[in-house]
């Protein structure tokens, strides 16, 4: 199970048609684009993938489609399988294993919340045991789940109960706990960083991989950031991080999900609009957004 | 659509077998028991029903089973259809209408949260339009969803956008907003109260119906409470509310969901244990709980 | 120490001059007005009194002035002495005792928060011991302090450690815990209710006294509410509560503190504007507020 | 006003005698110790200094004492003057200017919270205008104040309203906003970092100064961290950050404030125990803490 998620991992959008239905015909284009900008791994059906707004059947089809599209390519497939209903999560895990995923990840149930770390680990163990051949990542994203346990403690407890435990997709700005996680059991676990706008900080404390939504549409920025960091050129690394922040703040002003999906469209990957409860761009906002992206130079520095 | 939810409405538990699978054979017993204690309406697949932990298919089967069981009885069926995936919610709404439910209710998506009241109303409108013949209740439960909008404002906005809007299942301790909701458009909307342990307070400000989990296993307490309140005998009403609070606090000490389901078993309605992420009673806790229930007199005053 | 805070207690505003300095010359007018509308007790230097924005010396002078003004009258003086610095709180407690207050109250330190109920009780014990002859009320207001412990548990723990413990000023909408507090040790403690807009609910579960800011400028509404409730006339009681809610919501739209103080001015009690960080009414807002108060009929039903 | 807070700034403890009274005789020892480990600036009366638990008079005396002790030394004095009562904050600011402080800082009132960024800026402007000759730092610490505004926006708004604005003491883990603050108006403002356990991350994105409590008792760790970072030796920098995290987590397990003050005592700077509401170490805990500090090697790597 030595398959660490090094480098950038794109948390892909789920493509929808105009009527809101799943539009799997776009997956091939997504895969091509991501490969063309040098991103080697996709994280499918996560928060960026609006998995909470998908039916189980849709998530299964999405997994299957990505698996087909990536067959014979060098792109690795990580499937997110978490949801409130653990039976569904187990079905998704089984399907990911069947379809040759490289790893699975799952977040905590969040409507009903585990009351203890033990309960959370029990949930994860159940899911992981449905795909025992795949590395399992816990997806920690307390800002969305409202479930907040110590991640170093999670690793300690889960290490004895989840044989396939690979690490944590860490979407949490607590860098103290992050660095502690990196050190657990002499660095045994893989802790890909999940806060794009603080990637430079995470690299400094030891991150070697990162999963995020902006790696779909701005990977070159982060690749330059990483290269500059590795070369000890902090001034350049900061410049790239600053661009990343400016881009993310701009999208957030329009409603992040809708603006990010519109941006994908601007660059030729028509993933459509988000589903409710995420709001869509109001009339006229898309062209205004495009203008703002031009103003900050995104079409120059964001794509190559 | 004049079908206000007067009196007590039992938010039913979803019965599971020992292996955690859906155990629909128990529904008949649940219905009998509830009718035997004089509760006229059931609210199926809500929070008490662990709907977030059920697969869509299970929720559809649960609706169908309750519909069959209640056929020919005087018990009214309200089906909760809310979930993160609005397509699933619409499927559930259609099924509820097909199976002769008296009304539907839906909570807000909670993993992704509506960013504005308008977005929330749009979600509700979509669901309600899938079962246009059924009264629609919004299920406000901010402590679990983390979605908190002004409910009087919700009624104002939704009244023009949801033709089948019937009211709000109000599981929220804000009595100021509650009283305002009761007054919107001269009391047009039905606002069943959802905080069992504060029923007396809600009656004082004008509640005429209540939906809750403890009406499954302690309805007589609340029936006496209501009768005493209506007779102006506040001392007796307070005594019954005190019993209700003592019971709920006792169950909460053991983990409310597991303890409430165990209590159902003690009184002959074997709904099984909860699913993860809700924790189960540890070994030996069930008999300890039974002893504590005896100590507070529950088996005397709770059942008749 | 049998001096329960029955009926309405006005949490008085602290009067400021135009330059923001303490304007003690107004206290006499405040006392007259409150007595003229039949309110028998004042709670000085609480949240309504902007105590957090006062210097220690100002709080001492305020206590002294109220004590002088009330000398020889039948109005009872309760002094709030809580603050982040416990030494200051002890000084205030001593001063309250010296100046003949009927009771003291103190909220929890809130910048640094007690980490356990024991620590909170220790803080209260220290303050209470500085005025051992005066009944001590803990002032529970978690929405402002962010300190939230079980109040029934507080009474149990504090009962053995604070000889002068009289009860809790309960500004907390949790009616379940409220009713439990009323029952602790057979109703030994006095638990005046602190949520004006839910007074009717609190009466239903057993409240006998209430402390609040709107009893300064709308006492007749609440007096009719209480009389109607006691006469079993719930329809009238609800009407008065509805007026209270409408008034409070109106003031909140303007910024509650500034609007409430402006309202005091409209009725002839010139308590001035609030201090920073509370915002003042913007230019033109005062006359707009007065118009809105007229529209809802406040000047008719709020004052007599 | 070009006096950026470069390097490490020790947020000093306030020394108390056994009876809890202010023990100013220790200040000289604190100043010597801090200078001996190469820390060039002190931040007096901040959160570490338990300012919220001090009377105004005590804070004035503390300022005066530090001013006297530092006279003729090269150590710079920054005085924290923030508190709920803005009049007190202004008195403290005036005193800081009189006593030759290098700068002042103030946090937001937190019992009553500013409702808008404008209100917050108005509070700061009032304080800053009381010491117009001194650089003014806003002290952003949302985890304790509960006041959370965008700090880049704060700088934009405050830059036009506070002539002496020098920057922000940034005790907030949001690195995205931090990097944005560093860039406002071409890096005009000084933004010392306030989260000791994430110093390495902050250096990566551009921090040049840091204020914190652990720079009192573990400055050498951070000095080596900074030197390693500047030399491009990230492995060594991470090792030092790891020590810092281990130390801080250890202290937090005992109650951070009490454990940190006890640690000062272990190294010969007897600052006493904290005041309520901070809890003290229980009997026997001090020696256990000392043992734990030995176990992690603190007495070897923490002091030189």
Image: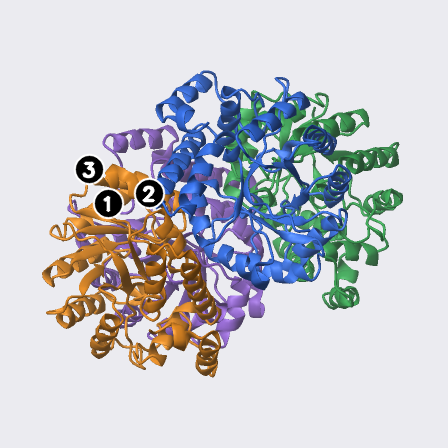
Chain colours: A orange, B purple, C green, D blue
Q: What whole-number distance in Å separates the C-alpha atoms at marks 2 and 3?
A: 29 Å
Relative to B203, is B294 above or below?
above
Q: Position of residue B61 (x, y in %)?
A: 20, 62
Query: Which residue position is annotated with label 3?
Result: A160
Judge the density around disc 2: few (<14), some (14-19), many (≥20) Cα neighbours within 10 Å. Answer: some
Disc with the residue nearer the chain's start (3 vs 1): 3
Image quarter where the N terminus of chain B lies is: bottom left
Tell me which corner region of the image, top left, top right, bottom left or bottom right, holds residue C253. Answer: bottom right
Nearer the observer: mark 2 or 3; the answer is 2
Left or right position of B146 against A1: right
Q: Is residue A294 left or right of residue D96?
A: left
Are the residues under marks 2 and 3 on the same chain? no
Q: Is residue C287 left or right of residue B3?
A: right
In the rendered image, which residue does mark 2 sit on?
A: D235
Residue B236 lies, in percent from the top left, at 51, 39
Element marked by disc 3 = loop
Left/right of residue C292 with respect to residue A225 in the rendered view: right
**Badge 1: how crowded within 10 Å, few (<14), some, or many (20+)?**
many
**Residue under label 1:** A189
Q: Nearer the viewer, residue C262 or A132?
A: A132
Secondary structure beneath disc 1? Answer: loop
Q: Quadrant of the C terminus of chain B?
A: top left
Looking at the rendered structure, the number of numbered marks drawn on it comes to 3
Q: Chain of mark 2?
A: D
């Amino acid at each position: 199970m030595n398959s660490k998620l090094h480098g950038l991992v794109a948390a892909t959008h789920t493509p929808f048609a105009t009527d809101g239905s799943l539009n799997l015909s776009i997956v091939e284009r997504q895969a091509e684009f991501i490969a063309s900008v040098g991103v080697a791994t996709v994280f499918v059906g996560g928060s960026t993938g609006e998995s909470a707004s998908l039916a189980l059947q849709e998530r299964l089809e999405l997994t299957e489609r990505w698996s087909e599209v990536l067959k014979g390519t060098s792109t690795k497939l990580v499937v997110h399988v978490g949801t409130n209903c653990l039976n569904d999560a187990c079905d998704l895990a089984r399907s990911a294993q069947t379809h040759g995923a490289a790893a699975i990840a799952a977040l905590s149930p969040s409507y009903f919340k585990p009351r203890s770390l033990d309960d959370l680990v029990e949930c994860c163990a159940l899911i992981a045991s449905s795909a025992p051949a795949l590395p399992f990542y816990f997806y920690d994203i307390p800002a969305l789940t409202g479930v907040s346990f110590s991640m170093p403690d999670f690793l300690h407890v889960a290490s004895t109960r989840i044989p396939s435990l690979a690490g944590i997709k860490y979407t949490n700005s607590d860098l103290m706990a992050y660095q502690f996680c990196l050190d657990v059991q002499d660095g045994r676990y893989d802790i890909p960083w999940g806060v794009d706008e603080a990637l430079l900080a995470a690299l400094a404390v030891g991150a070697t991989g990162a999963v995020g939504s902006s790696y779909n549409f701005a990977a070159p920025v982060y690749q330059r950031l990483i290269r500059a960091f590795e070369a000890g050129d902090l001034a350049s690394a900061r410049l790239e991080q600053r661009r990343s922040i400016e881009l993310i703040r701009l999208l957030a002003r329009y409603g992040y999900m809708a603006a990010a999906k519109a941006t994908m469209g601007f660059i030729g990957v028509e993933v459509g609009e988000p589903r409710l409860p995420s709001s869509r761009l109001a009339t006229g906002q898309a062209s205004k957004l495009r203008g703002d992206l031009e103003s900050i130079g995104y079409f120059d520095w964001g794509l190559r």
